[in-house]
Amino acid sequence: MRKHLLMKRRPEHGQSIPLGATLCQGGVNFSIFSKNAQSVDLLFFNRVDDRGPARTINLNAKNNKTFNYWHVFVPGVKVGQLYGYRVDGPFDPGRGMRFDSQKLLLDPYGKAVSVPENYSRGQASIEGDNTGSAMKSVVADIGSYDWQGDEPLRRPFTHTIIYEMHVRGFTQHPSSRVTPKKRGTYAGLIEKIPYLSKLGITAVELLPVYQFDAQDAPLGFVNYWGYAPVSFFAPHSGYSSRKDPLGPLDEFRDMVKALHKAGIEVILDVVYNHTAEGNHNGPTQCFRGIANETYYMLEKDKSHYSNFSGCGNCLNANNPVVRRMILDSLRYWVKDMHVDGFRFDLASILSRDEKGHPLENPPVLWDIDTDPALAGIKIIAEAWDCGGLYQVGSFIGDNWQEWNGHFRDDVRSFFRSDRGTVSNFASRLLASPDIYDHQAHALEKSINFVTCHDGFTLNDLVSYNEKHNQGNGENNKDGTDKNISWNCGQEGLATDPHVEALRNRQVKNYFTVTLLSLGVPMLLMGDEARRTQQGNNNAYGQDNPVSWFDWKLSARHSDVHRFVSSLINARLQKDISVEDPGVTLNELLRQSRIQWHGVKLNQPDWSRESHSIAMTAWSMRGRFAIHIMANAYWQDLKFELPYLSDVSFNGWHRWIDTALASPDDISRLIGAPQVTTRSYKVASRSIVVLAAGKNL
């Protein structure tokens, strides 16, 4: 790493705003918040693994403190300079203060982080100086990047197909054929953009890319998913193919710009509910050593942390200082990094006050909802937390969309042939009006998904009855036991061709419902190629082929890949349900023609023993109609077909039949085979979709 020679001109007072390290004429202004600190040292380094600073500047309360902000202007400091803080003050856990002047601390507002090869989480958790093994912040010039006219795309939700993916896992496998040095990086993802475009993806939802602590995991494992942030402003350096301190910053922006050129939005999975500093035995990396009593929710005795995240601590999100940091972070990623949206991990924690009690009108959530800098940006809530707060359908705000956990569970239950599932399944097809029609919610309030990073992949959902997490080192006790899965008759890899054929059919059933239901569809990386984790439903620590996308599967399951791509293309090219993107769910249900049937027309069977349902729906302007027949029963069923009074529709056409072999499983809408009979036999555990329209 290049040395940064510091001019020995005398530091000046500086100013409290803006927070972080700000490049100014002739030097850099540094500012951090710390209410109860007694003194603050700013340290500069020549190399990331230096055991001692090249220069130390003491900030004293008389000259370098305004209210609760410590600040200094240092002449001669340039872009790329490594730095950190040491903050001294009371170590009094009973009062919520955990100052440790021996620990090197990151800048909470630092725009880049450099990690030494000998980084040690353990050294940050015990007594003593950890300077040589600590992460360091990096001075960055945010305005120097050439965006070439790029801006966030602001694609309507009604024309959005979300693909949840892991930056590293997407290209790390050798079969990805990505340039070897770029595998598992932002640059590697750029090389695979043509694949995403061809599949039809319009938005990637990236698992956490804020700098996180990969060592925040049990011994022998790594934190692969990245839900362990140490910074809310810096892109994760481990996902960069470049080794210079500012490389991750530019490479991330290169990725965003390239995705935008392909018409693909970038949504970040963000973790504002906890940090990697963990519980009372955790490391001191940043917030704990600067203002522990401000940044975190503390228990009544204040020596322990509230833990609604399941990760040891919770950010005190509705504290004004923390609230401001969260808003500043979001604005930064939109304004300076050009991202298109955010999915908030365990968002219900953000609705709690400093004592952990749910608030009726949480300030931070309303701030995010109403901030003009975030207008038009996609904001999605995982509307629950590990403390039992479940807010799907009741999450605060006007612009928040929600991961719909009911969609996942009810669609799984229906295709597993559970009893009493038909009514809920029917509701999920229509954007869950039982959950969302009590308010004037937009049609796209519901983010519909069957699988996500947390749990089984789609292949494993139809291949395993039980989780198989022995490889996680926790005696198979980790991960949920509520998988709502069915192995189709054989646990694990199928040797019976009939089992394999049934699994393929079930996979296509799930894709059909996800992509045809009203709401916003979200797919999991690799599901279109039947990616497997060998039954592991909690692979957060598996940075290996268990979690990586094996690209050989795309050829092996090319029929599934073709099915998904064709279905996405049809959804995007021809709006089969709604022709007014501004319509609310209530308006749609009032104005649309929707009829429910069983095997007999207009006789739906809503009983607990029913495993089938049919629906006919016309688009709002009457230009298009579809007839969906879903049979989760273990025998074939013959469904009567509705009569089409509009002769211009030219009868029903078979668009989808998941029981048929490829390429007959899905046809192009224009030119699809015509159905001339008055009934249609729907094979066991399959879906058939017929289409009719003036242009078919």
Image (cartoon, rainbow, N blue to C red):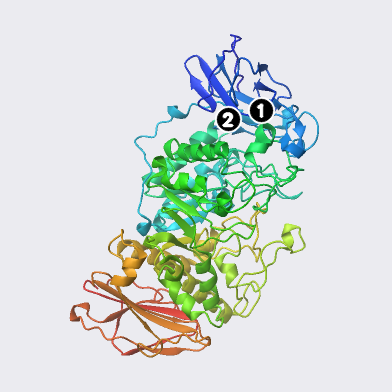
Could you tell me residue 641's position as x and y percent?
A: 33, 87
Furthest-top residue in view?
A: 9
Could you tell me residue 441's position as x and y percent?
A: 39, 61
Q: Is residue 468 above or below residue 71?
A: below
Residue annotated with mark 2: 245
From the viewer's perspective, is 18 left or right of 654? right
Residue annotated with mark 1: 48
Residue at the image point whose x is 76% and y is 32% from the top: 91
Q: Is residue 667 above or below residue 639?
A: above
Residue 237 is at least partly visible in this image: yes
Q: Amino acid at mark 2?
A: Pro
> Secondary structure beneath disc 2?
loop
N-terminal label among 2 and 1: 1
Task: Give the image quarter of residue 437.
Answer: bottom left
Residue at the image point whose x is 35% and y is 73% from the top: 667
From the viewer's perspective, is 185 left or right of 581? right
Could you tell me residue 148's position as x and y percent?
A: 36, 34
Q: Name the residue nearer the viewer: 542 or 97.
A: 97
Q: Are marks 2 and 1 in contact (CB under 8 Å)?
A: yes
Within 10 Å of disc 1 (Cα), the crowding (few <14, some 14-19, many 20+) is: many
Q: In what quadrant of the picture does the N terminus appear?
A: top right
Within 10 Å of disc 2 (Cα), the crowding (few <14, some 14-19, many 20+) is: many
Residue 669 is at least partly visible in this image: no
> Disc number at residue 333?
none
> Secondary structure beneath disc 1?
loop
Could you tell me residue 479's position as x and y percent?
A: 68, 62
Q: In what quadrant of the picture does the C terminus appear?
A: bottom left
Q: How many marks?
A: 2
